[in-house]
Image: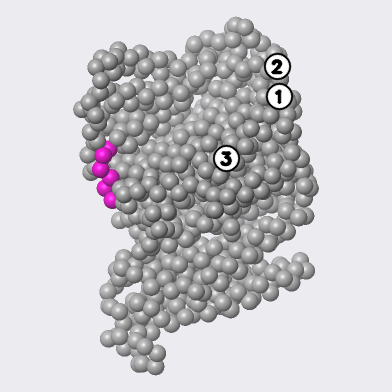
Amino acid sequence: MKKVFTAALVILFGVVLLFGLSKSIDIAGYGDGLIPGKAADAYINKNVTSGTGEIIFGETKNAETGSANMVTSVIANYRSFDTLGEVTVLFLAAVGVSLIMGKNSKEGKMKKSGFILRTSAGIIFPVMLITGIYIFTHGHLTPGGGFPGGSMIASSFLLLYLADENFKLKITGFKVAEGLAGTLYVMVGAVGLIIGGYFLINFLPTGVVGDLFSAGIIPVIYVLIGLKVGSEITGIVRDMHKEEVSV
Amino acid sequence: MINPVFMIAIPLILAFLSLVAARIKKWLLLSGVLINIAILFFLEKGETVIGGFKPPFGINLILDNYSMVGLALAGLLLLAGVVLSLDKADKYSTVLLTALAGINGMLLTGDLFNLFIFMEITIISAYILSTAGKKPEYSFNYLVIGSIGSVFYLAGLVVFYSLTGTLNMADLAAQNLSMGTPELLVPLFLIFTAFAIEAKLIPFGGWVKGVYGNSNRLTGALFASVYASTVLFVFGRVFNEVFALSGAVQTIIVLIGVVTFAFGEAAAFRQVKMRRILLYSSIGQSGLAAALFALGLIFPAVLLVISNAVSKFIMFSITGKLREIYKTDDYTDLKGVFFSNKLTGIAFSISAMSLIGLPLFFGFYAKLNALTALFNGGNWFIPAVILLFAIVEGAYFIRLLIALWAPGKEGEIADKSHAVGEIRIFNIKKSILVFILSLVILAAGLIPDLAGKLISSDSGFMGGDGPAFTMSQLKGGE
Amino acid sequence: MIRLASLLLILIGLYGIFSSRNVIKILIGVNVMELGVNIFIISVGFFKGGIAPILTADSFSSAMKFVDPLAQAMVLTSIVIGLGITALGLVFARKIHAQYDTYDLGAIGGGKDD
């Protein structure tokens, strides 16, 4: 009975939502999100501060951000302040997880894993780790970046947990990496304030669009994010792995 | 002059460092809240652009008198809370430092998506703090309701982005979308829902009872003062300067606020547990403030938020401590508890009487302002509701005060022997701190002109000469 | 149609949250909702024939038709926030289980206040 009532309420809400939204946005349509007139236009042409005309891959020098990946240019440069907050959200979640799980609870025991998993984990682990690092160092050129790269690093450690029931992580190193990476991110912003007059300004030369060493501070920030996200999610995995919850 | 971005950057750095240097995290927290207050008065007023990209492409921070009042209130109350409950705050040092960054960010930011992120930081810190109540089901409930709010906010924001192509507050305001039209009703309500959940408005405040009702000395005081006032300040900004309410939307939101006020005060009357009384009173005050903000009466609403935040801070702190000592917050079991704790008792009483709106207290000035503004606007219905429920409010607070002051049964001579105990509620330093805070309410009530001048929108805050509302000025320009 | 489907996902998530008493199922509902809103954001930033907003050897010029990078950046942020909330929610769930030995919120009986 309760479920029918809930369903009726949700359907009612859905009708109101769909009817209301259909007045402001084409609800059945798809593929009409044109760029002109939106803030995103300037992100694509990289002409927020000064118009440099057309941006050509592998040719344009010293553009505003120099990042071939435009999503990255938004995340790590135009709206880098958002990303600082985003990293903080994840940081806070990781801190919360470790606070709530309690300090004194011991690590959980898992079932002994199979032979194939045990053997292959040793081979796959370094490959995953390196791929994760590759992804966040190339965030300004290819899809990916600090967040996927960091998650990949964390999942490589999750693999170790799954493969070896006696595996224990020395967490202090990760805590230090997490704290320092976050501090450095803010420091990079503060250095920008001193050099360029704006917090988080891109104060390094941006180079040629498409080069590995280009895009100014974007790769620096993405490496820091990658390290931070990697150590945070690894910390979450480790804390969740604990057996006893201290009530 | 200090760049306002440090209001966010310094607590963040300290929060990150507190993970590395866990031993001194208590001192990092203390220095964080102190630095926050210290640099507050040297901040550069006006607009601060981040990353060197001009808005609406980059993110900007806006420091005007309005955000300044919000920052000062939240910062001072957080400082008082940390000092008063340092033993409890120690465990949550990292969380509180991050929360400080989130709160400052919420009050300063000039970008709606950036606001979303800082709001998430603030709310997630509240989820974590709420676990101090040892009732994980309520924290879970809060988390689920909160994330529904975030999803609605994002959905609404994206509709506005697709219509206007901007996320910047001033730029969006400059588009002069007519908010009364049915086209924008639903997206506006989606955004409103996110705020309504945090501002405890009916029917979105279902989480409050569990979270506030199981709060301790630290978390109760912070939730009811720092968090509540911040959300209301941002609510006021978003629904006055970014989306100027009008028409049916305005009527509905005002109505929701007034109903929340009536419900909160009526529900508080029926409670015997002190935390319950306070939480329903908080819901009521929050509803009234939201209604005033929605009507565009910013100055009285700000006064109300300030008066409520300071009073609730004192009352929740004392109630939390009483519960720690006597293992109950049922006031019928706490008769005469202030008999041997006069200083703390006076502080509690001043706060309660200010909330009722008795003359000479700051709450009176706030309510008087609200009533005058409403009458001037030709509104008779809301003043009638306010006055009617002021009687209810008076009844339950006076009843509470009498029980807490007078030991023994009715008709008996007040005597120490009938009081529940002679345990000191707070040690002498902490009682003095609480007492001084309550004196602020008294002083602000006695010299309302001074208080009004400090926070009014037409004079500079703290002697500064910055504009009261920057947003409306940014509207005209690029 | 994609927008309609994404809004439907939000509604399904809402139904899951309000109809279920199981903590884990409620969290799944929250995640379905977040998924729905993420798809909605992406759909708002897409136009027909648009290419992924990355300059490469093939799509080499900013004059070409790229889809909205800002919407994609917003989704990335939203996903990360969703991850954090889910992690916290799961820990709350474990805490509930440790305290009451059940994942069913109905069996707790609303929980008595202390």
Residue identifier under label 2: C49
Question: CA–CA distance between discs 1 and 3?
Answer: 24 Å
**Which residue occupies the extreme front position in the image?**
A1
What residue sits 23% from the left and 43% below the top?
Answer: A104
The amino acid type, in three-letter code, at marker 3 is Ile
Disc 2 element: loop
Q: Chain of mark 1?
A: A
What residue sits 40% from the left and 33% below the top?
Answer: A183
**Which residue occupies the extreme left position in the image?**
A166
Disc 3 element: helix
In terms of image quadrants, where is residue A177? top left
Q: How many marks?
A: 3
Our reading of the magenta stretch's main secondary structure is: loop
Q: Is residue B461 magenta-colored?
A: no
Asked if marks 2 and 1 touch (Cβ < 8 Å), the reply is yes
In terms of image quadrants, where is residue B452? bottom right
Q: Chain of mark 2?
A: C
What residue sits 51% from the left and 66% below the top?
Answer: B280
> Range of the magenta residues?
A242-247
Residue identifier under label 3: C12
> Which mark's residue is nearer the viewer, 3 or 2?
3
Examine the rendered structure and indicate whether residue A43 appears above or below residue B220.
above
